[in-house]
Image (cartoon, grey):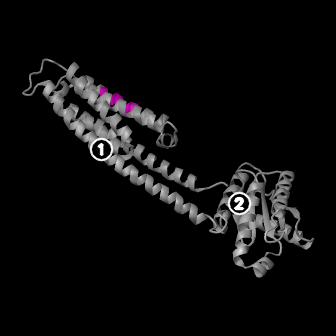
Amino acid sequence: MRDATGTEALERDRAMWRTYACTGHLLNILVLLIDTAYVAATWTTGAHRPLLLALNLGALIGLAVAYTVVPEATVAASQRRDLIFGIWMFCGVSLVTAAAWLDGGIHSPLAWLLPISVMFTAVAHRPRMVWISGSFAMVGYVALTVAGPTTVAPAVSGTAAMLTRLGYLGVLTLAAASGARSRWDHHDAQAEMHVELSRLADLDGLTGVLNHRAFHQQLARELAECDRRSLQATLLLIDLDHFKAINDRYGHGVGDDVLRSVTVAIAGAVREGDIIGRVGGEEFAVCLGATSAGEAHRIAERVRVAVARIDEPEPITASIGIGTSDEPHAVAADLFGRADEALYLAKHQGRNRTCWLRVA
């Protein structure tokens, strides 16, 4: 049975990642603008200012190209999303490290930009990505200390500055990873609860198949897909014969057992992926999607024979109507109407049979 809950959850997930990617893009632009302003403000007192300006302008151009080639929607939908963000983090840390190196090494104010990637990663990613981001930044600090300029004689040695920053960054990464873990644990619990509540809201409490509302929603989606692909949509409408008499003779508890047995019989006779719903007291519907008339009739007969094998508390039979839509932009009500006409014909002809009507 197909379920829309997973699709809805996927769309929510992608929307979140689109927002995150957009925010990250804007944050990168903001950092580069701050860097550019810093370079301009220290143009006459700092080293390598033309090269730093060129580096920032080149990064801005690179961001624009990346946004054009891989827009946020593509990133959000990608199966390699973590890899893309990992490359993004690596490039950002490399850019900041290079800028800080040109500006004087570990003592440059630009070196304090390295923890930004850790804090931003913790906003949406799981702890593993936070630790990766923190590791990138730590490598950046070590590189600034080992390969940084040696002509500067600050009050604090490069090694001491590096150790201070590494300690600060380690604590920050630990806190960010812990926060990310707590948030994602809560997120996963909420997502599981949402899926379960959505599933329960869509299912018939007695039989476990889709209820009337959920079935019609699924049928509408299937009709739209068939219309998009210029294909037929086929519906089976199944009604148990003389079911009221079973309730009257044996009680509603036994009647409920029969309905559950019928559900099992239908599920075993249709194909994997066919949509099953209970649309009335003793009435079931199966959406076969894009199915030929011959295949639809064979499936309907399998269902009828499977139901007829039920002999507790007495032999059970079902009448089945098949409706097929050939018209573009067909709606669920029209398809149900045609299947209901075919079902009425099956009842009128003596029950325990299958009848089929096309949409004219």
Residue 4 belongs to the span the image colors magenta: no
Which badge, 2 or 1, is on the more N-terminal residue? Answer: 1
- Tell me if 254 is positioned left or right of 185 in this view: right
The spot of residue 188 in percent (x, y) is 44, 52
Q: What count of labels does the image hold?
A: 2
The spot of residue 120 in percent (x, y) is 33, 43
Quarter of the image where one finds residue 200: bottom right
Looking at the image, residue 2 lies above or below residue 321: above
- The segment highlighted magenta reads 55-63
Q: Residue at x 76, y 60 (%)?
A: 265
Residue 276: mark: 2
Q: Amino acid at mark 1?
A: Ala
Q: Residue at x 27, y 30 (%)?
A: 138
Q: Residue at x 71, y 78 (%)?
A: 252
> Looking at this view, is 320 or 331 the one in front?
320
- Residue 354 seen in the figure: yes
Quarter of the image where one finds residue 301: bottom right
- Quadrant containing the N terminus is bottom right
Looking at the image, residue 51 lies above or below residue 234: above
Q: Check disc 1 and report its element: helix, strand or loop.
A: helix
Q: Circle 1 is placed at which residue position? A: 176
Instruction: Identify the residue at the far left of this view.
Output: 155
